[in-house]
Image: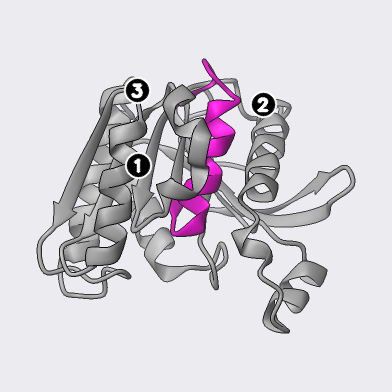
Amino acid sequence: MSSAGPSAVEITLREVGVLGADLSIVRPAGPLVVFAHGSGSSRHSPRNQAVARRLHADGFGTLLLDLLTDEEDELERRGRRLRFDVDQLADRLVGAVNWLDAQPERSAGPLGYFGASTGAAGALVAAAGQAGRIGAVVSRGGRPDLAGDLLPIVEAATLLIVGGNDPVVLQLNEQALARMRCPRQLKVVPGASHLFEEPGTLDTVADLAAGWFARHLGGGGHR
């Protein structure tokens, strides 16, 4: 596990099984961002990987995590909606953070979550129960509304990023923002759809995320 590039790791959680992950440590005591992907995705999401590369360049470590086991992923493909079990996603994020904090190569530096779609709700629910450990959350095209009654108790500074051409999700994000009490902001990326596939829009997401994490995790610092 070094800053040379991502290392494939396995995170074993009790009563869950093995979750695959890619861990990149830029600085052992530096800030690190845990990624929570959304429905229909995995740690191999090209959009999340692109944001992770930008964070690496700015001095942030990353953990891109599969939130379902291989067996659960197969059930998902058969029609189960396991990725919409927000409490389960949150529990696994908490487990991943506990695993991270136990790694000898990784000092307990500042941590943030980057969540997409339903993964953003899982990240907010997890952060609500990790006051003082999670310093910032960034949501990309997320469903923070699915965090429900836990939104007002989230303490981590939260940035919600939504595409300007994603009106339904934008409305849900505006409603969630109004319920939150932490330092928070909503950024709309003009011309972007839900997946930020339009030229330049994902770069804007990465810029916004890097700036937010630098502000609220103490700064990454270039390698």
The span picked out in magenta is 115-135
Please identify, in this view, whether the residue under mark 3 or under mark 1 is nearer the observer: 1
Q: Residues within 10 Å of mark 3 (few under 14, many from 20)?
A: some
Q: CA distance from mark 1 to mark 2?
A: 30 Å
On the image, numbered disc 2 is attached to which residue?
101
The x, y position of residue 112, in whole percent, is: 45, 33
On the image, numbered disc 3 is attached to which residue?
182
* Nearest the eye: 82 or 99: 82
Number of numbered tags placed on the structure image: 3
- Mark sitting earlier along the chain (3/1): 1
- Mark sitting earlier along the chain (1/2): 2
Q: CA distance from mark 3 to mark 1?
A: 12 Å
Please identify, in this view, whether the residue under mark 1 or under mark 2 is nearer the observer: 1
Camera sees residue 4: no
Which secondary structure lies at badge 1? helix
Camera sees residue 51: yes
Q: CA distance from mark 3 to mark 2?
A: 24 Å
- Identified by mark 1, the residue type is Ala
- Identified by mark 2, the residue type is Asp
Q: How is the image coloured?
A: one colour
Which secondary structure lies at badge 2? helix
The x, y position of residue 194, in whole percent, is: 30, 69
Q: Residues within 10 Å of mark 2 (few under 14, many from 20)?
A: some
Q: Residues within 10 Å of mark 1 (few under 14, many from 20)?
A: many
Q: Residue at x 69, y 81 (%)?
A: 79
| Membership of 57 in magenta stretch | no
The x, y position of residue 89, in whole percent, is: 64, 49
Please state, as top left, top right, bottom left or bottom right, where the N terminus lies in the image.
top right
On the image, numbered disc 1 is attached to which residue?
176
